[in-house]
Image (cartoon, rainbow, N blue to C red):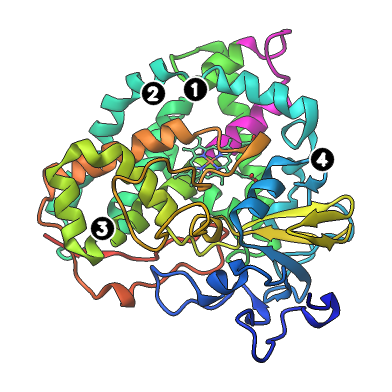
Amino acid sequence: MRNEETLPGRPESGSGCPVAPAYPFPFDHPLRPPTEWARLREPGCPIPEVTVRASGDTVRVLTRYEDVRTALSDERRFDRDLSIGGAARLTADETGGPFAIPDRSGPLSSGAAHQRWRRLVNRHFTAKRMTALQPRIREIAHSLVDDMESGPHPADLASAFAFPLPVQVIGALLGAPAEHWDRFSYWSQLLFSLDRYSAEEIRTGHDDFTAYMRELVTRLREKPGDDLLSELATTSGTDEGMPEDELVLTGKLLLAAGHETTSAMIGKITAILLEDRTRWERLKDDRSLLPTAIEELLRYDVNRGVGLPRYLNEDVDLDGRTIPARTTVVTVLPAANRDETVFPAADRLDFTRSPNPHLAFGAGPHSCLGQSLARTELRVAFETLFDRLPDLRLAIPAEELQHRQGQITGSLREIPVMW
Ligand code: HEM
């Protein structure tokens, strides 16, 4: 058994476990995992302490499926609130970045109040609503492709399709006027910023966003539509509803959470499919594969974001090691999704893989609330691209694709495509 003292992030000669001392680990290829992930999942390898590049603080990195699942499922010992004194900062400024924004504490944060909030919101994410939303998603997707076809060629699929689609969908779901969708896009990028925006910009953006949501909620309460926010607004303040402040926060959270992640995923999945066009052709020609293929693509994504951090309230045993209280751990979901003990031949993309218990949507009490919507959006997005742009291909080699810097979610900055 190795001595814990020798472990922290320092290369160990003669072992299969050495890791880069700074986190996030470097990637050699935009669509492949860093070598560190596989090394750290090896039996007997430590859960190392590494230094966060942006802040110089220390975190421990969880890469094994079971460890990541345990951390996400147990919010009592693995606290989600990083505004607690002593938690590591993932960003350079003193706020601790988006993981420590005030909105993350309170009823949306943890425990019984959070469960109640989740039930209230979940009630409105019905299968009926998702089905009803599909024609609207398709309409939005088709109109974006219309614009692509009449625009410059090669086009940037990220800005022409992957980014605008989810923001317009979430805008429609929430009942926000279409002319405001551009602002939503800015605010959600701000909320998911690590160091792309300054602390001042983030604070101002938060205030503007809150003021906007408050006005929208008031407007929808007076003149409700058939959208989700109208439904929540009309019950707000009653026993079955949520207080006004919570509702405003919910609007902000749904908008931001529903946009960045889905946009990033549409872009990265397109790149994975086009890197080897036989993948694209196979899925285009056999749509019956889409449901399992989408799960597999969610698993296969390497998401270059920083991972989900948690703060330990007490000593915790993980994989036979004690991680002391007051440690900040970072769970690397895509690393867990490549764990061979759960996913045989994990580096192979298998469109028929089943079962596929990937963690792309998290796990436990905070697992993604919008996953049914995300799956619907992904399916409609790719059906539309297959139908309208069947000859789509990358205009540059996949290895030249660049990731957007300074955001929590990993996303490709530009995806130049031709057809
Ligand atoms: C492919 C797209 C998406 C991915 C990969 C994704 C991923 C995730 C993950 C990993 C979490 C867990 C966060 C944590 O444990 O701290 C989460 C939470 C959440 N997601 Fe998503 N998400 C996606 C799309 C969406 C959409 C479309 C919506 C809403 C319309 C949404 C709303 C939420 C909300 C509200 C939470 C917080 C749940 C809670 O704290 O109880 N997400 N998502």
Residue at disc 1, secondary structure: loop
Along the line of sight, the residue nearer the viewer: 356 or 77 = 356
Residue at disc 2, secondary structure: helix
How many neighbours does mark 3 have within 10 angstroms: few (below 14), some (14-19), or many (20 or more)? some
Sequence-first tag of 4 and 1: 4
Residue wearing tag 2: 130
Sequence-first tag of 3 and 1: 1
Q: Residue furthest front?
A: 1
Q: Is residue 371 visible?
A: yes
Q: Position of residue 289 (x, y in %)?
A: 24, 40
Q: Report if residue 250 lies within the magenta region.
A: yes
Along the line of sight, the residue nearer the viewer: 57 or 14 = 14
Residue wearing tag 4: 76
- Measure the C-alpha gap from mark 2 to mark 1: 7 Å
- The image quarter in which residue 244 lies: top right
Quadrant of the rendered image holding ligand 1:
top right
- The image quarter in which residue 364 lies: top right
Say if mark 3 contacts mark 1, CB within 8 Å: no
- Measure the C-alpha gap from mark 4 to mark 1: 27 Å
Q: Where residue 125 is drawn, which disc sits there?
A: 1
How many neighbours does mark 2 have within 10 angstroms: few (below 14), some (14-19), or many (20 or more)? some
State whether label 1 is within 8 Å of ligand 1: yes
Which quarter shows the C terminus?
bottom left
Sequence-first tag of 4 and 3: 4
State whether label 3 is within 8 Å of ligand 1: no
Q: Position of residue 396 (x, y in %)?
A: 23, 74
Residue at the image position 71 percent from the left and 8 percent from the top? 238
Looking at the picture, does residue 235 appear above or below residue 380?
above
Q: Position of residue 299 (x, y in %)?
A: 43, 51
- Measure the C-alpha gap from mark 4 to mark 3: 39 Å
Residue wearing tag 3: 273
Q: Which residues are magenta?
A: 235-256
